[in-house]
Amino acid sequence: MKKALILCSIFIALMLAACGDANDYYEEQDDPTQYVPQEVVELDEPDEPTEPEEPTEPTEPNEPNEPDITEETAERVLDFVPSIDLDFAAEIFAIAQALWDEDDGQLMGVPLHAPLMIADNRTRHAVTNMPDAHGRFIRHGDVYVGIVPDHITVVGNPETVSGTRWGAAAIRLYTSGDIDKTEFIGLLIHEGFHAIQYYIISGQRAIQNFSHFNEPEMRISALLEIEALFAALRSNNDERLTHIHNALSLRNARRYGLPESAVTSENQQELTEGLAMLAELMLAFADIEAALERMESLWTSHRVGRALNTMSGYHRGFMYAMLLNEMGADWIAGIDFDADLGQLLQEHLGINELRTLEQQDLEQYGYSAIVQIERVSVE
């Protein structure tokens, strides 16, 4: 009996101890029926707060941060023989630099100096006019040499490589004889503009929609508008004003009833590609006549087939920008993606009423020949 009492006392003591431990999990609140779980273990004293680390610059996807260019990295020795003639690349970059310096912001209100790259897609070798942001390209004389990632194919386009957005061109375009040295320099200046275009054109670019150019009537209108703009640039005084008036009238007739996305696509392509063409032709070529000859040469290939759908904006944009400049308009400062170059020219000239198609002499722009090429029957 005595032994049973001792065992019972021990059991009661254990139960009370367990209940006391369980109560340590909770902290009683003002409402005694509400409890909040508490940690059982003791926590270490918190460390003193530290200053937050500075955020690192964004890098290419799946690429680690690289140090900036230093004297040590700039003096590394190439472990391969570049497939691109470095003397040629240095000459091309020097000419582009001289053209930018001579312009000194006159064409667009800001300097147009840009990162440039010449690439060989076969070997993946690339030569640039300045160091890259991640310090991977190795200095060799006046140029920098490195490797383009396998997923990038350079033709004539802006490309982001090693943290820098470059105006890039493939060396084969020159070595194959497709374009001459002046045209190659012009291409690099064109793509260089794209590398820095968001410093010049503000706002957000919309998704492009050029499906309306699948319709013959839309193509005929665009072709006639461009021919009228060519005529305006090659004439003066009242004759020039007549051609401008006709071009704007054709433009307005084509856009009537188009969805907003199509009109926005035309306007934004005219801005981005038209201004890039403006930089290319006005800097790389000797004068306006040489620039127009190059433009007309490009137009012969861009005006046919599906190329017209995506290339006509290059030509319209260039010519509207040229006419704005030649007519003395102050238009480029603060330009944004909502701008309409045609509308800017119309407002500058004070043109209030546009003409119907019947009020224009369209044959002077090759109307019958254009219609025949586009295979549209006209009553």
Image (cartoon, grey):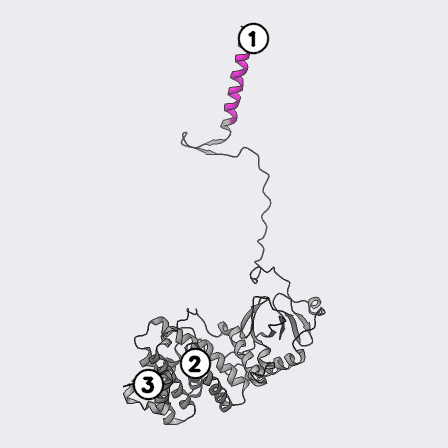
What amino acid is at disc 3? Ile
Q: Residues within 10 Å of mark 1 (few under 14, many from 20)?
A: few
Q: Nearer the viewer, residue 81 or 160?
A: 81
Q: Is residue 140 left or right of residue 249?
A: right
Report the disc number at residue 351: 3
Residue mark closest to the camera, 2 vs 3: 2
Residue 65 appears in which quarter of the rendering?
bottom right
The residue indicated by pointer 1 is 3
Q: Which residue is mark 2?
A: 317
Q: Tell me the SS state at disc 2.
A: helix
Say few, some or many: other residues with alpha carbon within 10 Å of mark 3 (under 14 / 14 to 19 / 20 or more).
some
Kindly give the residue lying farthest to the top in the view shown.
1
Q: Earlier in the sequence, mark 3 or mark 1?
A: 1
At 50% from the left and 87% from the top, the residue drawn is: 294
Q: Which sits in the foreground, 244 or 156? A: 156
Q: Position of residue 123 (x, y in %)?
A: 63, 71
Say what amino acid the circle numbered 2 marks. Answer: Gly
Q: On the rendered image, what quadrant is the C terminus found in? A: bottom left
Tell me if I can see residue 108 in this picture: no
The magenta segment is: 5-21
Using the rendered image of the protein, determine whether residue 180 is visible from the camera's viewpoint. yes
Mark 1 vs 2, N-terminal side: 1
- Residue 27 falls inside the magenta stretch: no
Label 1 amino acid? Answer: Lys
The quadrant in which residue 166 appears is bottom right
SS class of the residue under badge 1? helix
**3D distance between C-alphas at marks 3 and 1:** 116 Å
Taking 319 as reference, is 215 left or right? left
Q: Main secondary structure of the magenta part?
A: helix
* Residue 213: % across, % down: 37, 77
Decide which of 297, 353 is in the foreground and name it: 297
